[in-house]
Image (cartoon, rainbow, N blue to C red):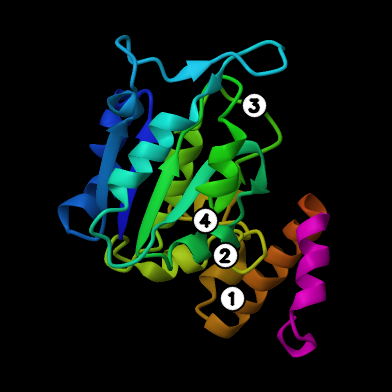
Amino acid sequence: MRVDILTLFPRLFDGFKEETLIKRALLNGCLDLHIWNLRSWARSKHQQVDDTPFGGGPGMILKPEPIFEALDDLLQDRNSKPLVVYFSPSGKLLRQSTLNELCEAENLIFICGRYKGVDQRVLDNLVDCEISIGDFVLSGGELPAMVTLEGITRLIPGVINDIESATSDSHYKGLLEGPLYTRPEEYRSLNVPDILLSGDHAKIADWRREKSFEITRTRRPDLWKQFIKNVPAEEK
């Protein structure tokens, strides 16, 4: 997978690329990551990329020219058109299903906004998908880009040693994961549930599934409602 990221602050990604899953994905060739400084496509002497909004109002807007010209360059010599993602509070909420879909793409371009956002002509003509990571506002799209890339990368075969670990995580199948325990069996008079020590894998699987149902019903009734709606009765 190739991912290109357009940002005004490329150094924000320096540490991100050098740690954990992203570093592993880069080293083993599963991920081809390119971070681009949007100012490289600015026309003015001072590399200005923003301007005041037409019609008045507070804040600054990212100009269309640098983004259009950056995409012109990045789209050259591609076998297929990349999926262009812009991070915005107005975008659709990022979910595990979204990450699963993005993971199927061979090429992605992330546009990290700043200030009040981008000129609408960018959204209307270049962007395929707007994504929000929650109902709040950040100063730019860099952190959402990292969140999204981390979520995608861990799904790429060869990045995580135990892919079953990823496919059993919360949200992967529309449910929250149940409680997890590890050694020691007893700590400060707090004990691991007997069922997990029984060795009966069928009963353990049933217990984990029921706990997953219970936690999802209690903490995320919206997810539970969607799960009940979409999953065949014999699988519930």
Distance CA(mark 3)–CA(mark 2):
26 Å
Label 1 crowding class (10 Å Cα cut-off): few <14, some 14-19, many 20+? some
Residue under label 3, please give it: 137
Compare marks 4 and 1 and give the one earlier in the sequence: 4
Q: Which mark, by number, is residue 181?
A: 4
- Residue at mark 1: 204
In the foreground, 67 or 135? 67
Earlier sequence position, callout 4 versus callout 2: 2
Q: What element carries label 2?
A: loop
Q: Is residue 62 visible?
A: yes
CB-based contact (under 8 Å), mark 3 and mark 4:
no
Q: Nearer the viewer, residue 70 or 89?
A: 70
Q: What span is in magenta?
A: 221-236
Amino acid found under the numbered disc labelled 3:
Val
Quadrant in which the N terminus is drawn: bottom left
| Residue 132, magenta (yes or no) | no
Q: Circle 2: is it few (<14), some (14-19), or many (20+) Cα within 10 Å?
A: some
Name the residue at 18% across, 59% down.
29
Q: Mark 2 points at which residue?
A: 172
Label 4: few (<14), some (14–19) or many (≥20) C-alpha neighbours in 10 Å:
few
Residue 119 as seen in the image, left or right of residue 224: left
